[in-house]
Amino acid sequence: MAKFIPEHIISEIQSSVDIVDVVSEVVILKKAGRNYFGLCPFHSDKDPSFSVSPEKRIFHCFGCGTGGDVFTFLMKLNGYSFPEAARILAARCGVRIPEQSLTPAQKRLIDEKTRLFKLNAMAADFFHHSLLNGVSGKNAMTYLNRRGFSEDIITRFKIGFAPEGWDNLLSFFYKKKAPLNYVEQAGLVVANKQGNGYYDRFRNRIMFPITNIAGSIIGFGGRVTDESLPKYLNTPETPVYNKSRSLYGIDAAKTKCRTNETVLIVEGYLDFLALYQAGSENTVATLGTALTNEHVRMLRGCIGANGKAILVYDSDLAGIKAAERSIAVFDRGHIDARILVLPAGHDPDSYIRKHGRDSFMRGADKAKNIIDFLTDMAVKKYGHSVEGKLRVLDAMIGPLSAIDDINKKSLYRKELAERLDIDESAILHKVRDRNGKKNDTRSWVSENGAMISASNGSGGYTDGETETAKAKFERRLIAMMLQFPAIIPEIENRRLPYFFENNLLKTLGNTILKYYADSEGHVAELLNGIQDERLRAMATSLAIDDRTWRYEDCLKLINQFESGIKYPEKNLSRKIKEAAAKGDDVKVIQLLAEKQKYVRNKAKKKCVRRR
Ligand SMILES: [Zn+2]
């Protein structure tokens, strides 16, 4: 995480800044016990579920699960990168971040990026000026006016025009004495075949500057105003531009996304601008690519864990394709995704102009979730005959298999069964077949429909899965380790995490042990060092509780856990009950003998310990 700033400086910042102070600037906090509580700024919170611990220097929301240290808070709130958040906090508490701490390679990378941002900003100014003042920009301006875009929106998004000709931008940079190899690196000019010069990449196109979430221009999209091809031309991949990590309008949309907990996702620049101008500022556009995990992660940071994403498409076919492609990414990102297909012949722009924004928003509010939408489409296509139902079922197995969340999956399965009026087990078998083919060891569906995670290393509980009593116990132990580090040596001695059944908690337990073995650091630092987002969220939620631990109580808990490992009496008692219920007397006697043996052994061990 802390790529460019040395660890000790980060620790210094963290211990000098009061997290309560920082959070108080945006959240009204009230003290209760050792922690502070308030309304969460990351989701629309009705009860104060947002908690800040000044001692542990962390925050956690029990409503949406967002949590972390003071750096994370600023990053999530303002979309800052880690170094940005660190710089702001450093300035606040007077800690100096030494420049010389950067390795030459790191410094080169920062310089390179800063340079590209600057060249892009210069190019954006040039294009914008050409649109507003150039003779050649007149047609482009007429086009934009005809599409109904106001001067405000054109200025707000610095829309521009790349004039016809091979060297307009090139001469501009030449005059500015910008090194042309860097201008080429920014993707703005292209080296000619002879290798002795460059030419403009964007010619006779309306130019849309693309920014990152912090507002720096990372690239451009260029659109023709006539029928020439390609219709759209984007900046190629550069050190600052990667289309699978970029969304048009994200910087402008982030605030409204946060307050509305909803984001509209459209396909093009003009759709975006039309919606934004009509007042739907919580809109972003993809840049000619399917939604990626990175996109969804970025959007989730804006809309929060309970947020909703609405994909807007202009035809059933485009909608179906997008829906099928994006189920898995939305599912992995835990985002409630919906889809809105506009009536035939309409895009968002034309729809809003004809029917108004209110009508559009009503449609968006009623947008169906992806699975319902796909079911509708399949039923529409194949009908209700027996043959048709089978085909619908076939069409829906892929989408259902793409969902990992067991509760969601089971719900959809039930719905589909009801809707097609078929037996749910038929769907269950089909999904199981598909999942079996997809990944043999990863997961399977048990008879009662619950997803069981196989031990493949990363296995743990999928959200919503019922936690076993054992896992609950393990969770309590982890909470204890995080809240009362004095107990760590005892845990270490007895190698407790080794006996954990839940893989996620086991990993977490070992991470904590490893951390305290290497340093005497602070819990916020430990949490910061956990790379896996899910693991970190879990750790933060366990760490924030402000209960007071006493050493003796901790020992009791540890002993209780150990005895559970070595003397599985409970298990035996359950088996005995089961056997008795079945009337299997032989088994009952056998199990009773086993239990007695355990109890005797345990008593012996206790005697040894006391001596
Ligand atoms: Zn929250």
Image: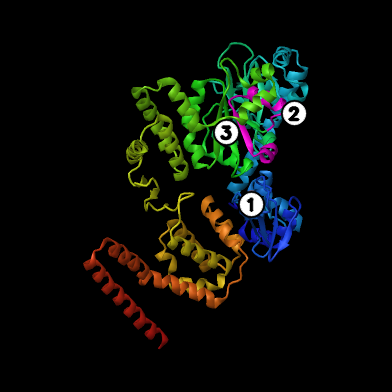
The crowd level at tag 3 (other Cα within 10 Å; few <14, some 14-19, many 20+) is some
Magenta stretch holds residue 378: no
Tell me what residue is drawn at x 31 percent, y 64 percent.
575
Tell me what residue is drawn at x 53 percent, y 78 percent.
552
User: Viewer-proximal residue, 88 or 248?
Assistant: 248
For badge 2, the amino acid type reads Arg
Q: Residue furthest bottom?
A: 611
- Please give left or right for residue 338 compared with residue 28 in the image: left
Residue 156 badge: 2
Residue 238 badge: 3
The crowd level at tag 1 (other Cα within 10 Å; few <14, some 14-19, many 20+) is many
For badge 3, the amino acid type reads Thr
Q: Secondary structure at mark 1?
A: helix
The crowd level at tag 2 (other Cα within 10 Å; few <14, some 14-19, many 20+) is few
Ligand 1 contact, mark 1 (Cβ < 8 Å):
no
User: Viewer-proximal residue, 536 or 241?
Assistant: 536
